[in-house]
Image: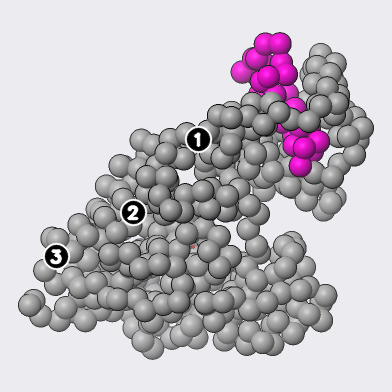
Amino acid sequence: MVAARLLAAVVSEGQSLSRAAPPLLATLGDARDRAFAQACVYGVLRHYYSLSGRLEASLARPLRAKDADVRALLLCGLYQLEHMRTPPHAAVAASVDAVRGLRKTWAASLVNAVLRAATRSDPAPRGDIESRFEHPAWLVERLSRDWPEDWQAVLAANNAQPPLTLRVNRVRVTREQYLARLQTAGLAARAGKHAPSAVVLDTPVPVEDLPGFVAGDVSVQDEAAQLAAGLLDVPPGARVLDACAAPGGKSAHLLEEVAGNCQLVALDRDAERLADVAATLERLGLAAALACADAARPADWWDGRPFERILLDAPCSALGVVRRHPDIRFHRRASDIDALVAAQQALLNALWPLLAPGGKLLYATCSILPAENDAVVASLLETSADAECDELPAAWGRATPHGRQILPGEDGMDGFYYARLTRRATAP
Ligand SMILES: C[S@@+](CC[C@H](N)C(=O)[O-])C[C@H]1O[C@@H](n2cnc3c(N)ncnc32)[C@H](O)[C@@H]1O
């Protein structure tokens, strides 16, 4: 029932999964029930288009909009039958029971009939593009245009379950020591391939089960995101700006890398999310100057002292992290992209003059669309004679005209883009 409510909130009310899930899942007292509901919701979202197609085909007439919760319940039931190892009779009985929890007893016979029919027949493969790839048609088309060689692998990676990747706080513990602690705790894990702080668990576990998590020995962060700190390469004592800092993963990491020895200004315009940065830094025993402001309007918050390093982890379509946030495929619209690109360009243009001569700005997104990545960097290079693009020699991702792109799933990582710009000390 909680799973159905959560799914309806995401699919029908347009709420974000990461915001809607914690309060609803917290209403379940038992950790196994929470894990089951979560697996069900994430699973339905990953297979939403094919499951919806199957459901629509089995209904005599579509359900009314106000019965989005019943529809969600049916999708959860179908998901359990098709993709989970739930015994069919248990999936049907639990779904019929849940109807009562939704106070819609009229739907019990409908849920029973649809799910029992589903137990008797295998799903017919559907030929439409959305069911085949479990993505909206516009996105399939866009990715096949942007990545003609790789789009099918990208879509498959988006539908797969991501690993749980940790960032070891190397001020407190070495990666080898932490891997040994995991082994002692019976948790199989391996070192990440590219980021020296990354550890990848074989099987995800709740963070409370991770040794030293509460004490700040590790944080959850994808390996691709952990590449930012190394690329930024903060000199000890430097003045650093993290312009879009919340929820604080990269701020924390770059502070860890210099053992807190830099003057970090962590900015975000979302006060609620900025509170997450404060909580993250507190757990890790780190400190930064936090400011709630629009990074694209430095006149509102900048004290006029240049920064030696700037991280612009720009707001983006997040199309590189669909595997972690399977609801992105519903919430994102083709028409969002132009507005995002405009915001990214505005941020980059506004922040560039804040960089000290000889300083470095790292532009990052968790997008895989060249329009949000290379094209944004190219526009700054065209207009700023003192901007120079660094070559990023790396064993990860692929070189693009101005930076490097990791596609989702490559070496187990999220889709991410990085470009590093140096401000020339004197104009050429
Ligand atoms: C990709 S997230 C940053 C993730 C963060 N760097 C981390 O590693 O945890 C982008 C953030 O940019 C913030 N943001 C969007 N537009 C902004 C603006 N004009 N000024 C400041 N922050 C902004 C959003 O609130 C969001 O928290």
Q: Which residue is mark 2?
A: 370
Amino acid type for the residue under numbered disc 2: Pro
Q: Quadrant of ligand 1?
A: bottom left
Instruction: Kindly state the secondary structure of the residue where label 2 is placed.
Output: helix
| Residue at the image position 71 percent from the left and 16 percent from the top | 59
The boundaries of the magenta stretch are 55-83
Residue 424 versus residue 414 in the image, above or below: below
Q: CA distance from mark 1 to mark 2?
A: 19 Å
11 is higher (above) or lower (below) than 428: above
Where residue 34 sits in the image (x, y, percent)? 78, 48
Picture coordinates of residue 157 (x, y %)? Answer: 57, 53
241 in the magenta segment: no
Say which residue appears at 42% left-offset and 39% top-offset. 141
**Which of the numbered marks, if any, corresponds to residue 384?**
3
Residue that mark 1 sits on: 136
Within 10 angstroms of label 3, few (less than 14), some, or many (20 or more) residues? Answer: some
